Image: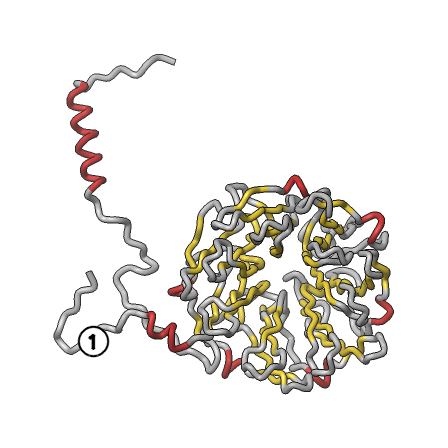
């Protein structure tokens, strides 16, 4: 290739470049149309929450924020938010102590993944919180070790196997005091309703007591050899023997219960679940909803993966009968609905000590974003829809998995709601502190101009 001939005098070119540089140095910063030249008119709070998204969450209206976990990444005493992202780089939102979240770029590298869930624990025992993500399409699960100063180091090579990950839970399954990792796997081959499934195995990674923060693949020796197709996992003591068992939610197979013998070896006990109707379940939660001291099960369901009307998407509640079985008492205890729910969370939003529910709602067919639902527990396991009183009217989206924790220091849980291609939203509980954090509204009077700049 021939060199380009410079026909303009060198001095003229240099002078022009210096002029451009000087102009750029004195240029005003770019004005963000999302916040520029208007006054924020605060949304009305509910009796419980204020939707603080517009002022306290990085605005990313098309982000696929699939899950979140609240941890203090830098030991400043404030919970920060780690967000798993589908088809993007996973995110860290740092909390300034008032519940205002700031985006920290590249906290988890620069490579995109199809991350579906995130969980946290101090896996290597150094006193700092670490995080693990599971990925679906690229099948690259990730482990990041925290340094206690807000930084993370990629240690994904310590995870001994990969899969099409869709479920994730962390807990000490073998009683050695170390956090282990349970990955729920699926075998989807496409995104059409008739796409075949291939066999999928869940994964169990035991934390190596001789080398903490490294993991041993115990899948073959500790889990049933089955085609799992697992979308969500909860580890909880379901039979009262003091060991963490596993409740598995599936989009393709009946949901399952695995009992742990205490060494981390699981046996199928799914015959204890009263599964009365076919379900396409996207999330499972465990809570004692009726105050009898026994864990009950909630399955959050969809009619289809936005392919049209198929199965009944009604959320199902299975009550522990105290004899080892879980009986479906949905009809007598939960509000009836026809929306699909990719996720729901258990939170005591009215402070009465009984677990209430926040339920994601999406209209299918159409994949239409709807308002988040709030179901209040009377303490005996009877739930009433109190959405109008509890959820702000603006809290609308394709609600995905939810994280919770006290971000603003008022002692009550705030809620970060993921969104699939819609803005992730933050519900704060300290209504007065939030109101006081907003700039005053300017007074507009007839004929009197007001300058914002």
Q: Which residue is mark 1?
A: 443
Look at 58% across and 71% down and name the residue there.
Answer: 361
**Residue 195 screen position, x and y as percent:** 73, 52
**Residue 437 screen position, x and y as percent:** 34, 70
Seen from the viewer's position, the closer of residues 176 and 447 is 176
**In the image, residue 99 above or below residue 288:** above
**Residue 321 screen position, x and y as percent:** 81, 80
- Residue 450 left/right relative to 71: left
Look at 26% across and 72% down and name the residue there.
Answer: 440
**In the image, residue 3 above or below residue 405:** above
Which type of secondary structure does the marked residue at label 1 adopt? Answer: loop
The part of the image, by quadrant, that contains residue 432 is bottom left
Classed neighbour count for the residue bearing mark 1: other residues with Cα under 10 Å, few (<14), some (14–19), many (≥20): few
The part of the image, by quadrant, that contains residue 159 is top right
**In the image, residue 298 above or below residue 217:** below
- Residue 136 left/right relative to 279: left
**In the image, residue 162 above or below residue 375:** above
Q: Residue furthest top?
A: 2
**Residue 224 screen position, x and y as percent:** 85, 55
Seen from the viewer's position, the closer of residues 178 and 173 is 178
Whether residue 133 is visible here, answered yes or no, is no
């Amino acid at each position: 290739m021939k060199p380009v001939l410079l026909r303009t005098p060198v001095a003229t070119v240099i002078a022009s470049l210096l002029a451009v540089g000087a102009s750029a140095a004195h240029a005003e910063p770019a004005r963000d149309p999302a916040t520029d030249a208007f006054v924020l008119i605060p949304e009305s709070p509910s009796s419980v929450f204020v939707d603080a998204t517009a002022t306290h969450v990085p605005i990313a209206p098309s982000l696929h924020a699939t899950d979140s976990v609240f941890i203090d990444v830098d030991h400043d005493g404030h919970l920060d938010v780690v967000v798993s992202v589908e088809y993007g780089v996973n995110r860290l939102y740092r909390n300034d102590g008032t519940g205002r979240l700031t985006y920290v770029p590249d906290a988890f590298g620069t490579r995109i993944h199809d991350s579906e869930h995130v969980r946290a624990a101090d896996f290597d025992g150094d006193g700092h919180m670490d995080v693990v993500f599971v990925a679906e399409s690229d099948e690259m699960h990730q482990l990041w070790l925290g340094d206690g100063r807000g930084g993370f180091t990629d240690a994904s090579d310590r995870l001994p196997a990969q899969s099409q990950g869709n479920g994730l839970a962390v807990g000490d399954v073998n009683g050695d005091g170390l956090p282990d990792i349970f990955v729920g796997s699926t075998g989807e081959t496409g995104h059409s309703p008739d796409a075949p499934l291939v066999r999928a195995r869940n994964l169990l990674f035991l934390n190596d007591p001789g080398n903490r923060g490294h993991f041993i693949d115990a899948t073959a020796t500790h889990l049933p050899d089955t085609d799992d197709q697992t979308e969500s996992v909860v580890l909880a003591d379901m039979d009262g023997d003091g060991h963490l068992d596993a409740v598995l939610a599936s989009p393709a197979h009946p949901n399952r219960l695995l009992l742990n013998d205490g060494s981390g070896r699981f046996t199928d006990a799914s015959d204890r679940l009263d599964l009365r109707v076919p379900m396409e379940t996207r999330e499972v939660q465990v809570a004692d909803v009726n105050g009898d001291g026994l864990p009950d099960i909630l399955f959050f369901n969809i009619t289809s993966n936005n392919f049209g009307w198929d199965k009944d998407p009604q959320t199902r509640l299975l009550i522990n009968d105290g004899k080892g079985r879980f009986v479906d008492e949905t009809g007598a205890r939960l509000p009836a609905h026809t929306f699909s729910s990719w996720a729901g969370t258990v939170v005591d939003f009215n402070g009465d000590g009984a677990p209430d529910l926040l339920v994601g709602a999406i209209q299918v067919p159409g994949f239409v974003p709807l308002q988040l639902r709030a179901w209040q527990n009377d303490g005996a396991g009877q739930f009433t829809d109190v959405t109008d009183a509890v959820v702000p009217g603006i809290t609308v989206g394709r609600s995905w998995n939810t994280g919770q924790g006290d971000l603003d220091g008022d002692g009550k849980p705030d809620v970060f709601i993921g969104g699939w291609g819609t803005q992730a939203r933050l519900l704060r509980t300290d209504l007065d502190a939030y109101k006081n954090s907003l700039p005053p509204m300017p007074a507009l009077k007839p004929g009197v101009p007001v300058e914002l700049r």
